[in-house]
Image (cartoon, rainbow, N blue to C red):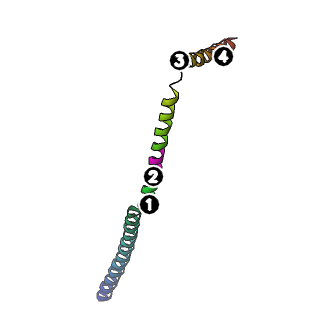
Amino acid sequence: MSASASASQAYDREAQNDRRLNDLASQLSTLRKVTTDIGNQASDSSFVQSTTDAFSSLSTSIKHSSHRLARSSGVSLPVYKTVFLILIGVLVIYLIWRLV
């Protein structure tokens, strides 16, 4: 009986080792897939390139806008004074209306 018990234990250990080996193989396969996906995404530079192009376009647009603003700021000083006085007037009227 001890020989059959020993054989049974050996069979159980072998089955347990096979399960662990299959689990390890499954985990290794998953790791390989993840590594491959990461490598594929890292080598795909189209997203990075499109983002770089978008920021470049935005930078160019801001430069053009700032140049237009600089050219338009050549307007005479009385126009700025008038706009400033109108804004102050609107602010004062709003504050008075708010207090009442």
The image quadrant that residue 7 belongs to is: bottom left
Mark 3 or mark 4: name the one nearer the start of the chain: 3
* Camera-nearest residue between 50 and 31: 50
Question: Which mark is nearer the camera, 1 or 2?
Answer: 2
Specify the amino acid type for callout 2. Asp
* Camera-nearest residue between 31 and 86: 86
Q: CA distance from mark 1 to mark 2?
A: 10 Å
Q: Tag 1's secondary structure? A: helix
Left or right, 99 with reference to 42: right
Specify the amino acid type for callout 3. Leu
Which quarter shows the C terminus? top right
Q: CA distance from mark 1 to mark 3?
A: 49 Å
Mark identifier at residue 93: none
Q: Residue at x 48, y 44 (%)?
A: 58
Q: CA distance from mark 3 to mark 2?
A: 39 Å
Q: Residue at x 38, y 64 (%)?
A: 43
Question: Which mark is nearer the camera, 1 or 3?
Answer: 3
Q: Tag 4's secondary structure? A: helix
The residue that mark 3 highlights is 77
Q: Tag 2's secondary structure? A: helix
The residue that mark 2 highlights is 53
The residue that mark 1 highlights is 46
Q: Is residue 19 above or below residue 68?
A: below
Which quarter shows the N terminus? bottom left
Q: Is residue 64 above or below residue 4?
A: above
Crowd tier of the residue under label 2, counting other residues whose Cα lies within 10 Å: few below 14, some 14–19, many 20 or above: few
Q: Which residues are magenta?
A: 53-58
Q: Residue at x 33, y 78 (%)?
A: 17
The residue that mark 4 highlights is 94
* Camera-nearest residue between 4 and 61: 61
